């Protein structure tokens, strides 16, 4: 009964276990999937700078301490925060084109490389290796100077990793025309068509089944 659930659903972010990282995901593809195309009709997940910063925190691209420091800067430099959001959306748009058409089109890859190097080129900071709370290690980049400057580094680094690993052939858009999500196909045969089998894949299966039933009539 509903009464039994009321006490269980109390959400406390501190008690939440760390979200397990699904195998073969890529930060840059998750970032692309925040746009209005993928979220439709929900709209852009990165609706303001705070939403962008929270997204980075949730995805481990910014630690809590740095996020707190950035939030203090936002109060002092709202224009810089707004410009950072505009830039993040610009990078995201370039990466969507790369995810959807990068494998087949050299010019798309060249444009993305320019965009990646634009972001990498203006950032100054130090690289670090840090232990992760849930075990293992992670490489981090600690920007010096402008608090906003290095925010996009983990995104473009992740994109660069995919380009270096020559895995664009396995990056594609979901086969469901209503779904705009992009994903990395980690299957052995490389024939995965849907972003999530449980939703888009099943929807396609149900549609095929309906079509068969109609033709048989
Ligand atoms: Zn899908």
Image (spheres, rainbow, N blue to C red):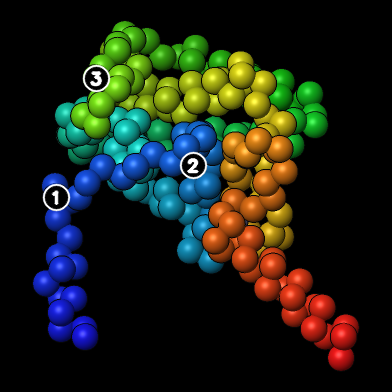
Q: Secondary structure at mark 2?
A: helix
Quadrant of the drawing holding the N terminus: bottom left
- Is 86 on the left or on the right of 96, as rendered? left
Label 2: few (<14), some (14–19) or many (≥20) C-alpha neighbours in 10 Å: some
Question: Which numbered dot is residue 131?
Answer: 3
Q: Mark 2 and 1 residues: CB-CB less than 8 Å, in contact?
A: no
Compute the Cα span from label 1 to label 3.
Answer: 21 Å
- Is 177 on the left or on the right of 74, as rendered? right
The residue pinned by badge 1 equals 15
The residue pinned by badge 2 equals 30
Q: Earlier in the sequence, mark 2 or mark 3?
A: 2
Q: Earlier in the sequence, mark 2 or mark 1?
A: 1
Q: Residue at position x 59%, y 43% from top?
A: 183
Q: Mark 1 and 3 residues: CB-CB less than 8 Å, in contact?
A: no
Q: Residue at position x 24%, y 32% from top?
A: 134
Compute the Cα span from label 2 to label 1.
Answer: 24 Å
Quadrant of the drawing holding the C terminus: bottom right
Q: Secondary structure at mark 1?
A: loop
171 and 34: which one is in front? 171
39 and 213: which one is in front? 213
Q: Can residue 70 be seen at all in this image of the molecule?
A: no
- Which residue of the protein is positioned furthest toward the bottom in this rendering? 217
135 and 126: which one is in front? 135
Q: Is residue 196 above or below residue 172?
A: below
Q: Is residue 78 above or below residue 163?
A: below
What is the number of callouts on the image? 3
């Amino acid at each position: 009964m509903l009464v039994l659930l009321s006490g269980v659903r109390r959400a406390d972010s501190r008690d939440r276990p760390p979200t397990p990282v699904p195998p073969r995901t890529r930060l840059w593809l998750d970032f692309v999937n925040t746009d209005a195309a993928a979220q439709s009709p929900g709209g852009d997940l990165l609706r303001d700078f705070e939403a962008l910063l929270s997204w980075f925190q949730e995805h481990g691209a910014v630690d809590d301490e740095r996020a707190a420091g950035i939030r203090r800067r936002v109060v002092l430099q709202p224009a810089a925060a707004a410009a950072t959001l505009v830039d993040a959306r610009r990078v995201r748009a370039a990466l969507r084109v790369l995810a959807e058409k990068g494998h087949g089109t050299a010019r798309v890859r060249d444009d993305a490389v320019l965009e990646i190097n634009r972001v990498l080129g203006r950032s100054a900071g130090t690289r670090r290796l840090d232990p992760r709370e849930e075990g293992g290690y992670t490489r981090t980049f600690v920007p010096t100077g402008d608090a906003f400057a290095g925010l996009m580094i983990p995104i473009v680094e992740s994109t660069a990793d995919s380009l270096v690993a020559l895995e664009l052939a396995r990056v594609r858009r979901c086969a469901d025309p209503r779904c705009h999500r992009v994903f990395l196909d980690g299957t052995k045969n490389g024939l995965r068509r849907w972003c999530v089998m449980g939703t888009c894949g099943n929807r396609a299966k149900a549609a095929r089944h309906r079509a068969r039933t109609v033709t048989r009539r």
